Amino acid sequence: MTNFNGTLLDGNTFLSINNRGYAYGDALFETIKASSGKLLFWEDHYFRLMASMRIMRMEIPMSFTMEFLESEILKTLEANDLEKASARVKLTVHRNEGGLYTPKTNNVSFVIAVNELSDSFYTLSEDFYEVDLFKDYYVSPSLLSTLKSNNKALNIVGSIYAKDNSLNNCLVLNTNKHVVEALNGNVFLVKGNTIKTPALTDGCLKGVMRSQLLEIIKLIPEYELVEDSISPFELQKADEMFITNVMVGIQPVSKYRKKTFKNEVSKSLLQKLNVKIRLS
């Protein structure tokens, strides 16, 4: 069952070919992890969505309160018998039909789709995980590059490149040739007692898991947190590299070119992340 503007529908045929998310990528989305009816980091997701809608000049309905959208998500989980399970929730907001590049309206609709997941909390994968740079196309740093929109052509082509080259993931560069993020999450480097991640001004996604880890790291006195540009040359000097997103939590990187990495910091941060979830 899919939730379209509050109505539960069986199937995926309720969107027309004139849908602006399909026709122009005029849509935003949040991918949320639900665990036994609890939406992890829901407040962060909600406020990022509201900020993104303002940047996209979408009209935010008066009904779009945090409580309303949460209740609609929970209603959708219950309709799919997932209220007591772990699930992946995709909340999409698209501008309503009409117009070409210039829309006829800034009013919006929402769609909620859910799928079952196997793990309720985050576990550290010990599997081999290799990455390399994706240099065919670059991110142009701006507010738009920080949004979770339907414009994901670079991520799609990059993912095909990774698959064709037997890689688990790729790191994306911006037009200044700085490392911005991975294809499906934010990137962190560990060198000694310094943990570094690209600044938002470099064009990386304003990830919800990124925000959670920044809060955790700031409370650990033995580590210095740095948000700054990352040169590709720094990758091979790092002791550890990991990728973050709300679905997997923390994904340690095993290898970048000839460099292999440890995962001790990843393990420690993941433990603290799960404790934070249990206490929230």
Image: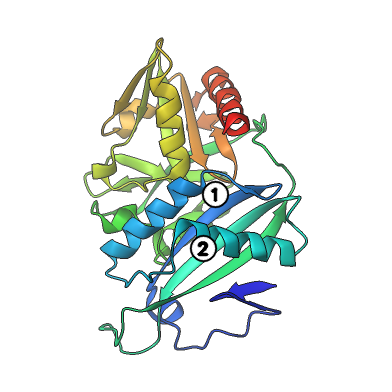
Specify few, some or many for label 1: CA neighbours under 10 Å numbering under 14, 14-19, or 20 or more.
few
Q: State which quarter of the image contains the C terminus.
A: top right
User: In the rendering, which numbered label is found on residue 165?
Assistant: 1
The answer to which image quadrant residue 150 occupies is: bottom left
Residue at 49% in and 31% down? 242
Horizontal side of residue 245 vs 104, given as left or right: right
Horizontal side of residue 230 vs 43, given as left or right: left
User: In the rendering, which numbered label is found on residue 68?
Assistant: 2
Residue 44, how many percent across, how many down? 44, 46
Q: State which quarter of the image contains the N terminus.
A: bottom right
Specify few, some or many for label 2: CA neighbours under 10 Å numbering under 14, 14-19, or 20 or more.
few
* Amino acid at dot 2: Phe
CA gap, disc 1 and disc 2: 44 Å
Residues at marks 1 and 2 touching, judged by CB atoms closer than 8 Å: no
Horizontal side of residue 81 vs 198, given as left or right: right
Residue 126, how many percent across, how many down? 67, 29
The answer to which image quadrant residue 248 occupies is: top right
